[in-house]
Structure formats: structure tokens, C-alpha cells
């Protein structure tokens, strides 16, 4: 739960990353031997809060989505394709050619043929 909370905070940008930086400050101090002013550097370590990089935020969002199973892996489903064929107003030999073409393109398909003729008055 704690990891999920941290990922959520990172994804929305509320979490800050703490980095340690070396701060170098300079000052002029008098040299007691010569009486001249010398430039002296003082170094110390400070912690600084910086926002999380956009790439890390995207990674956190991706990990949250995987946790909630929003993404699915590729899967091959062997479901048959359903094809509707309207043969009204066509010649019978044209129907046979079309059905052979459908059988060639979709070998394991279920074909529904609409062969109800036009109403005659």
C-alpha cells in the first residue's frame, strides 16, 4: 500500500525528490601573517527538494496502470469472423464469385447471406 501511495504521489507530481548538493561559498578574509585579503572557499552539503522528472512521472503512471491491470498483453483470439453478404439484385454467377472470394479472404468465417428478393407489386 505504501509503494502504491508513493507511485500515486509521484504520478500526480506531489512527491518531491531530495538531492544532496555541495554548496561552495566564497568570502574574503584577512591573512594574519601578511595582512592581505585572501579569497577563501567554504564548502558544505545541503539537501534540496526538486520536482520529479517527467520521465519518472510517466514511469510511475505506467506502473500504477500495470498494478490495476489496465493494460493487457497481446493475445491471439481465434474467434470466427462474421460476414454479412447482401445478394439482392445481383446475378447468381456473381454471387458465387463473391462467396468464393469471401471464403478465400475469411476461411473460418460465418457468412450470413441476405437473399430475400425485392418485393414485387
Image (cartoon, helix red, strand yellow):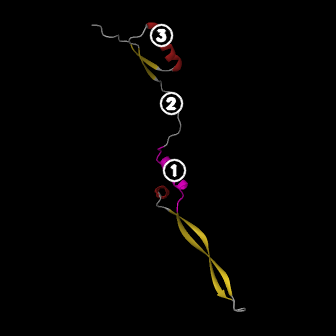
Query: In 3D space, how far apart are the residues under numbered discs 1 and 3 (Cα atoms)?
Result: 53 Å
* Above or below, comparing residue 30 to residue 53 in the picture: below
Instruction: Say few, some or many: other residues with alpha carbon within 10 Å of mark 3 (under 14 / 14 to 19 / 20 or more).
Output: few
Q: Choose mark 3 or mark 2, whichever is in front.
A: 3
Q: Residue at x 38, y 11 (%)?
A: 89
Q: Residue at x 65, y 87 (%)?
A: 29
- Nearer the N terminus, badge 1 or badge 2? 1
Q: Position of residue 94 (x, y in %)?
A: 46, 10
Q: Position of residue 117 (x, y in %)?
A: 35, 10
* Above or below, comparing residue 78 to residue 22 in the picture: above
Q: Residue under circle 2?
A: 77
Q: For residue 69: magenta?
A: yes
Label pair 1/2, CB-CB below 8 angstroms: no
Instruction: Please name whichever residue, 93 or 8, is drawn nearer the observer in this view of the structure.
Output: 93
Mark 2 residue element: loop
Q: Residue under circle 3?
A: 96
Query: In 3D space, how far apart are the residues under numbered discs 3 and 2 (Cα atoms)?
Result: 29 Å
Q: Residue furthest front?
A: 36
Instruction: Please name whichever residue, 19 or 80, is drawn nearer the observer in this view of the structure.
Output: 19
Q: Residue under circle 1?
A: 63
Relative placement, left or right, of 117 versus 62 is: left
Query: In 3D space, how far apart are the residues under numbered discs 1 and 2 (Cα atoms)?
Result: 26 Å
Q: Which mark is residue 30?
A: none
**Magenta-tinted stretch:** 51-70
Amino acid at each position: 500500500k505504501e509503494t502504491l501511495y508513493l507511485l500515486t504521489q509521484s504520478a500526480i507530481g506531489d512527491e518531491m525528490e531530495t538531492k544532496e548538493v555541495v554548496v561552495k561559498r566564497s568570502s574574503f578574509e584577512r591573512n594574519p601573517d601578511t595582512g592581505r585579503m585572501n579569497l577563501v572557499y567554504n564548502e558544505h552539503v545541503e539537501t534540496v527538494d526538486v520536482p520529479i522528472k517527467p520521465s519518472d512521472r510517466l514511469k510511475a503512471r505506467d506502473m500504477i496502470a500495470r498494478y490495476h491491470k489496465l493494460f493487457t498483453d497481446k493475445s491471439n483470439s481465434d474467434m470466427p469472423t462474421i460476414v454479412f453478404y447482401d445478394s439482392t439484385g445481383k446475378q447468381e454467377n456473381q454471387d458465387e464469385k463473391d462467396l468464393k472470394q469471401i471464403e478465400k479472404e475469411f476461411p473460418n468465417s460465418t457468412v450470413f447471406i441476405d437473399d430475400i428478393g425485392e418485393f414485387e407489386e
